Amino acid sequence: MDPLFVSLQILNGIQYGLLLFLIASGLTLVFGILQVINLAHGSFYMIGAYLAFWLTSRTGSLGTAILVGLPLALLLGLAVERLMIRLLYARDHLTQVLLTYGLILVFNEAQRLLFGNDVHGVPVPEIFNASIRLTDTLSYPVYRLVVSAVCLALVFAMYLVIQKTRLGMHIRAGAVDRETVQLLGINIKALSMFVFAAGAGLAALAGMIAAPLSSVYPGIGEHILIICFVVVVIGGIGSIKGAFIAAILVGLADTFGKVLIPEFASVAVYAVMALILLWRPQGLFGRA
Amino acid sequence: MAEAVLVTESLSKRFGGLVAVNDVSLTVQTGDVHCVIGPNGAGKTTLLNLLSGALPPTAGQIRFGGQEVTSLPAHRRARLGIGRSFQRTNIFPEFTVYENCRLGAQAKLRSSMHFVRPAERDVGVRERAERAMELVGLTGRRQALASALSHGEQRQLEIGVMLATEPSLLLLDEPMAGMSADETTRMVALIRRLKAGHTLVLIEHDMDAVFAVADIITVMVNGAVLASGKPDEIRRSQAVQDAYLGSDDA
Amino acid sequence: MDRNPRLLTILAVVAVLALALVPLFAERYTIQLFTKIMTMAIFAMSLGLLVSGVGLVSLGHAAFFGLGAYVLALTSPANEGASLWWALPLVVLVTAAVAAAIGALVVRTSGIYFIMLTLAFGQMLFYLFHDAKFAGGSDGRYLNFRPTVELLGSELLSLNDRPTLFYVALVFMVATYGIISMILNAPFGRAIVGIRVNEPRMKALGYNTYAYKLAAFVIAGGLCAVAGFLYATQYRAVNPALFSWRESGLVLMMVILGGLRSRLGPAIGAFGLVLFEETVQALTDHWLLATGVFVIVVVLLLPDGLASLFQRKQPTAAEADDG
């Protein structure tokens, strides 16, 4: 294979992986700190994508759509945490699955009611609507680079928050041991609320910036949710570092799967997961 | 000299930087009641977990009945005859006393998977369960839900479930924990009865009870064995007095 | 565990007898609907063995439903029906073998991990059949002829006859209940319930809990294949949506809403949910919205699930004590 082509695929894989990380990081922290399995996490991605579609068609600008949509998504995350998720902390996984599954049904049907079953597109913002010509047949869209850059900036910001701030220390402690955090006098309720809302916001933001790359369609949230489960399972529950490495791994496996074994591309990711689990049942960075 | 039923050689367990069990070499003789005492955090329960197979050791060896069992998982060791009771009462609360014991008795079936014949029909299982209930004195409470038993009765059931597997070596983790004086007396009597036909390794904090039942006492401090010997020797040992007994006399 | 099973058993027998009368009076549509419900009841009961038996919450059980249906569709000859005598065992065995392979990996885990892993493996099978040409891709495949039931060269039953298929489904449903009951009453069943309640203790007693969980997973998969077999027979078509995690989620809802403490719970849940779907669907296109709201309300208002509405109170300590 042509090295240029391979490098472009690597770039694509990393870009997809970074996007997955934005979504999976919230998921893994909600598992780790709130000890809640949130099936509806993918719905925030879907909501982000549809907000991007709706607000862009109103305002004509994806940037404005994000500025307006992100606070909306954060508020929604806060509301869901306050009204529903909070009641699940003491409940078993079965109840959590049931309630968040119910939430998915509600979100999905709300989406169908508001936007129907059609597939929608979101235009790439004008200033980024260009391609870098590499050879006569190969070119690379600028917007993909922009998405990667935004994701990288967010990853870096997350790293700073988690490693360098007091809040981050609490988050790290919470992911290791919820009881200890309470003993240390940290307000676990406020921490949980923050983590959940931030996770929801990140997932929605991912949905917004990815909207111009892939179309916006019903069921978009569930597809991404399950891939993110795979990321969390590979990385190990509660591990941000694990989620990052697993996300890149899954991004690359998915991209190269599509190139090398197009017929079974979607299976490739799950095969990688199965292999890693044979080796480490608790995930790469999970505690046994 | 009787043959040793359980031997550990330089057994160690580390959790990260913490050494919970440090180079413990024990010999438990057949038919003895071997008590392990020591302050909280001495590594007694971890030692029991290593013996039962609930935890893998970091280093060292365990032999049971002359057979090397160091790397066998818990369920395999149980089938060889190592029974274990827990410090925190660990029964099946939603089952009756009888059902609890039957679950223990059934573990002994040679081929463990039976899908067709009702569990009730197996006479051997039923008899083992009955015997276990009788040994711990719960026959009269057979239909009571385990969750409805008093604390002392639950501790008895805890041992009954284990006895139903017909083990030859019993590992008991603080069987008297949280018991009233009456209940403790009954438990001491039970342990004396069990001595016929079983070897016992016992962790206990109640010193009166320990000296009442022990043939051999091993004192652990900070994960290591400080002293091991007959009750009289342990009582007289200055090292033990200094490290442990003196402060615990009250 | 059923501690007061008598009343429920009588009700169940009455319900089965009433059900047996349906084809005598009902019209075509109703017969078809109830055939489908009984298929779903088998599906739900097989999952119930995992969820309320062993305590393993699988969110990928539809994989075995889809697999059962596809194995029948793919192995049926093009110009005649497959014989039920070999097709049904084949469907069950192939599905159970796949369940063993997946189970070997997933039952090593528990809790959240198990939920996510079963979901992921279910999705893996979904994509496998979605993308595979031999299985007809996203359109799936048709079954040209329904399986035949012959004895000594002459036709015993015709599954093309709607009432006959209905009764076959009824027999399969009752048989599934019988098999699950038998298993739960046998030493194996006692052991898996013990594992649900307290796994470390079971290990200390000498149970190889991994083997038990794996065996239960395989049995549940095999029983589920029977439901898939019935589905493919009834609709003469299979498609990848059978594997989808919505299907897994719906069947899990049936199990939970029907009541985890009763062996009949999953079947009750299947009847309840499908009939609810039928009723709401007649009124609105958005029946899933109603279902979603319903589920959320149940979880928030009834901490012990819908079943607690219909269930006698658990015996309190004092009541259980008088024995």
Image (cartoon, coloured by chain):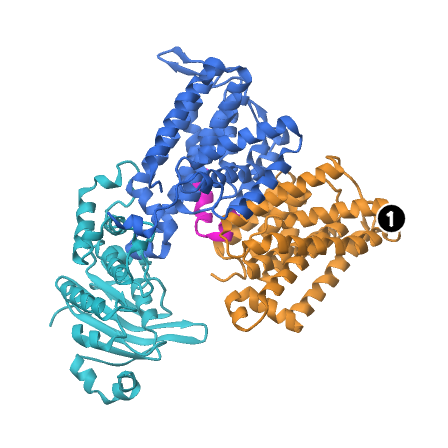
| Point 66% across, 33% down: residue | C286
Horizontally, residue C177 falls left or right of residue C285, namely: left
- In the rendered image, the residue lying farthest to the top is C154
Q: Magenta segment, which residues? A: C95-117
Horizontally, residue C167 falls left or right of residue C205, namely: right
- Residue A53: horizontal and vertical position, in percent? 79, 45
Shown in cyan, the chain is B
Question: Picture quarter containing residue C185?
Answer: top left
Q: Which residue is mark 1?
A: A59
**Of helix, strand and loop, which one carries label 1?**
helix
Q: Colour of chain A?
A: orange
Residue C5 shows up from this direction: yes
Question: Picture quarter containing residue B179?
Answer: bottom left
Q: Amino acid at mark 1?
A: Thr
- Residue B212: horizontal and vertical position, in percent? 17, 74
Using the image, determine if residue A58 lies above or below residue C25. Answer: below
- Residue C13: horizontal and vertical position, in percent? 37, 26
Give the position of the N terminus of chain C as an image quadrant. top left
Q: Is residue C102 magenta?
A: yes
| Point 38% across, 74% down: residue | B20
- Pick the front one: A223 or A89: A89
Q: Is residue B15 magenta?
A: no
Using the image, determine if residue B226 lies above or below residue A154. Answer: below
Question: Picture quarter containing residue C175?
Answer: top left
Horizontally, residue A195 falls left or right of residue B178, namely: right
Q: Colour of chain C?
A: blue
- What secondary structure characterizes most of the magenta part? helix
- Pick the front one: C22 or B210: C22
Residue A15 shows up from this direction: no
- Residue C95: horizontal and vertical position, in percent? 45, 34
The subunit letter for the residue under badge 1 reads A
